[in-house]
Amino acid sequence: MDFERLVNLIVEEVYKKLENRTEEIFNEKKKLVVLWEDSLEKYKEELVKEYDIYSYEDGIKDCDTVVVSKLCLRGLANLANGMNVSNEERFILKMIMKGKKVFVINSGVEYKRYSKTAPKILYNKYVEFEEKLKDYGVEFIDSLKEIKQFKDIGKNNIVKEEISEKYESCSEKSLELRNKKLIVESDLRKLYKKDMKEVIIDKKSIITPLANDFIRIQKLNIKRV
């Protein structure tokens, strides 16, 4: 066998292995970790084609996607404030920090059960916690099917803030939030500009205590229309 033919055979073999490895990588499922869920059957029914699905255990250090099936009052407050008192909460915070996609099932969010009985000020406090998590990139969803609608995002997309179309600035010195029924601190902090003087809201809009504090500190005028 001459040298040139031997080289060609080696090159062909290397190409075959590279093609096989590329196909394996392309077809490799991503890892989805579910927290605080007794059964994974419904997750496997909906998402098994896209993900390898696991229940959270202490040994799990990383994944591509997190689904939080239940979120108690303490857990919501801790995560919103960047704190943790359990391995599960620590894991969720680390995944958020790594830019991984985190989903929370709305039906499992405890504070929402008390919308008709809780004092409005206290309930709005937890609404603010939820808004903070959304600012961190966490998605609150009603069904597992919604997970398929989201593409993976990287760190650059986490850092970038996008302003919703419903927030329209009337001028450099005023901010219009008439389309929001509940005004939370994160709305104001996200859109605040140094020379802003006025926030325009609906007559029936509710301003949370933290948002009121922000308005007072920044010396903003509230105009209800």
Image: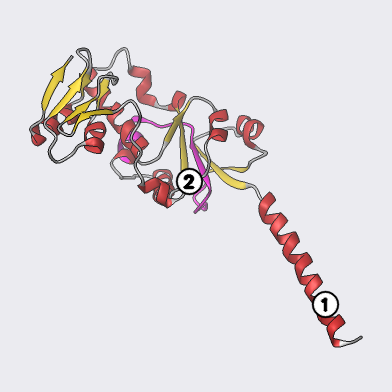
* Circle 1 or circle 2, nearest the eye: 1
Q: Where, by quadrant of the figure, is residue 169 drawn?
A: top left
Query: Label for residue 8?
Result: 1
Q: Is there a contact, CB below 8 Å, between mark 1 and mark 2?
A: no
Which type of secondary structure does the marked residue at label 1 adopt? helix
Residue nearer the viewer, 38 or 175: 175
Asked which quadrant contains residue 14, the reply is: bottom right
Question: Does residue 213 show up magenta in the picture?
Answer: no
Q: Which residues are magenta?
A: 57-78
Can you say whether 225 is above or below 132 in the image? above
Tell me if 182 is positioned left or right of 75 in this view: left
Q: Quadrant of the N terminus?
A: bottom right
Q: Which mark is residue 104?
A: none
Q: In the displayed structure, does residue 223 sit left or right of residue 137?
A: left
Q: Amino acid at mark 1?
A: Asn
- Is residue 68 shown in magenta? yes
Residue 129: percent from left, percent from top = 30, 33
Give the Cα distance between marks 1 and 2. 41 Å
Location of mark 2 (residue)? 153
User: Would you say 69 lies left or right of 167 here?
Assistant: right
Which residue is depicted at the point 81% across and 71% down? 12
Q: Nearer the viewer, residue 43 or 39?
A: 43
